[in-house]
Amino acid sequence: MANIDVKKYESVVLYLAKQLGGELHGKKKLAKLLYFVDFDYFEKHETSVTGDVYKALPMGPVPEQMTAIIKALEDEKRISVSAVAEREGYLPTEIYTLTTEDIGQDLLSAEEKETVDHVVEKYGHLNGKELEILTHAEAPYLGTAPGGVIAYELAFYRGTDFSEHA
């Protein structure tokens, strides 16, 4: 398992929620936004932000520790988790709502916050299904066997355009 700084990981989730207006809509959306944060950051800095391991699952990359991090944040009463039935025949959408002002933002470097901000700007308006489609087209997902661990080094084959992003 990866070497994860739990408090920093929590800060990334909370900072994402803050930048999205205080709420994150959907487990799939959160998983994909974390993927973009980690793989964008790795592509530029050769290290990830969360330190999590991503699996190539049918709905796209999923970080192994995300559920545990969400549970810890809920137990600490830093977020509330609710479920909303949005469409008949589908599982309810989990909504993660900030319940604290203390998001631990100081645990993130300026470059890490910049990456999160860029991911929110570029992908924050998309839903989980739209993000799933995007991640399915990326080299890290395509280059990994179903159910396998996605190698961060595959980020170098994505061809991400950082030109509008310092």
Image (spheres, grey):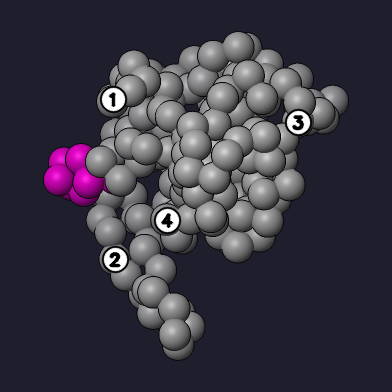
Q: Is residue 99 above or below residue 55?
A: below
Residue flagged by tag 2: what amino acid is it?
Ser
On the image, the x and y values in percent for residue 30 come to 47, 49
Residue flagged by tag 3: what amino acid is it?
Arg
Q: Is residue 111 above or below residue 90?
A: above
CA distance separating discs 4 and 2: 11 Å
Is 45 left or right of 16, judged from the image as shown? right
The answer to whether any part of residue 49 appears in the image is: yes
Q: Quick one: label 1 or label 3, which is nearer the N terminus?
A: 1
Q: Which mark is residue 27?
A: 4
Residue at position x 61%, y 55% from top?
Answer: 132
Q: Which residue is mark 2?
A: 82
Q: Which residue is mark 3?
A: 158
Is 136 left or right of 109, judged from the image as shown? right
Q: Which residue is mark 1?
A: 7
Residue at position x 56%, y 49% from top?
Answer: 60
Q: Nearer the viewer, mark 4 or mark 2?
A: 4
Q: Is residue 129 magenta?
A: no
Q: Quick one: label 4 or label 2, which is nearer the N terminus?
A: 4
Point out the residue furthest to the front here: 145
Is 64 left or right of 41, judged from the image as shown? left
Q: Quick one: label 3 or label 4, which is nearer the N terminus?
A: 4
Residue flagged by tag 1: what amino acid is it?
Lys
Residue at position x 49%, y 32% from top?
Answer: 149
Q: Are marks 2 and 1 in contact (CB under 8 Å)?
A: no
Q: Nearer the viewer, mark 4 or mark 1?
A: 4
On the image, the x and y values in percent for residue 94 come to 36, 63
Q: Quick one: label 4 or label 1, which is nearer the N terminus?
A: 1
Q: Are marks 3 and 2 in contact (CB under 8 Å)?
A: no
Give whichever of 10, 53 is nearer the camera: 53
